[in-house]
Image: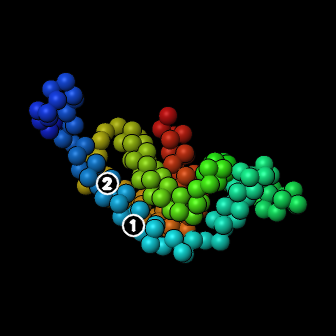
Amino acid sequence: MAQVVNNKADPGKKPIPHYRLPTIVVTVVLLALSLALSIKLLAFAEDDAYIHFRIAENLAHHFAPYFNISEPVMSTSAFVWTCLLAVFAFFKLPLPLTVAVLNPILIVGGSLAWLALLNRLLGRRINWAAGALFQLVYAGLLTLSGTGLMETPFALLLMGLGFLF
């Protein structure tokens, strides 16, 4: 039976299981570090990201999903990502900064989804140290594309959730 942390503040509230606390701590620390790194490296975004941004802005403001409005050529390889960016552009959010904040959330969410999938495939919950290592490796592998403001963290999160559910 798993130990639980005693929560006397609200007797009707379910306490957090003791085995989840390390995962929560690792997740919060990983999110904070990823967010700080993403903001610090914002100026070094990949040029492909700006292609997606321009197409998204044209879609949001001119309802034309093209790089150049006068040239109706579909030039995005990630249409769902571009549509998500178009929603942000529609509300006039600065796309580079928005993605710099969004990608760390997607990376950490993806690490949790794939960790849950790994636990399901193994048929048991792996210990917290192995789970933390898994999350760190996953985040490390996606740091380059995440700080480059690319769509890879979004795609892998969706794929992990697709396998999970």
SS at mark 2 in the image: helix
Does residue 149 appear left or right of residue 112 in this picture? right
Where residue 61 appears, as percent x and y from the top left, is: 74, 52
Q: Is residue 117 found left or right of 149 in the rendered image?
A: left
**Rendered-image quadrant of the N terminus:** top left
Mark 1: secondary structure: helix
Please tell me which residue is depicted at 21% across the width and 28% down the height of the picture: 13
- Of all residues, the one furthest to the front in this rendering is 92
Q: Is residue 79 above or below residue 48?
A: above
In this view, the mark in front (2 or 1):
1
Q: Give the residue at x 18% y 41%.
A: 18
Point 23% across, 50% down: residue? 22
Q: Residue at x 80, y 57 (%)?
A: 66
> Which sits in the foreground, 10 or 150?
10
Q: Is residue 81 visible?
A: no
Give the amino acid type for the residue marked by disc 2 in the picture.
Val
Can you identify the residue that label 1 sits on?
36
Report the residue marked by disc 2.
Answer: 28
Q: Amino acid at mark 1?
A: Ala
Front one among 102 and 1? 102
Q: Is 123 drawn above or below residue 111 in the view shown?
A: above
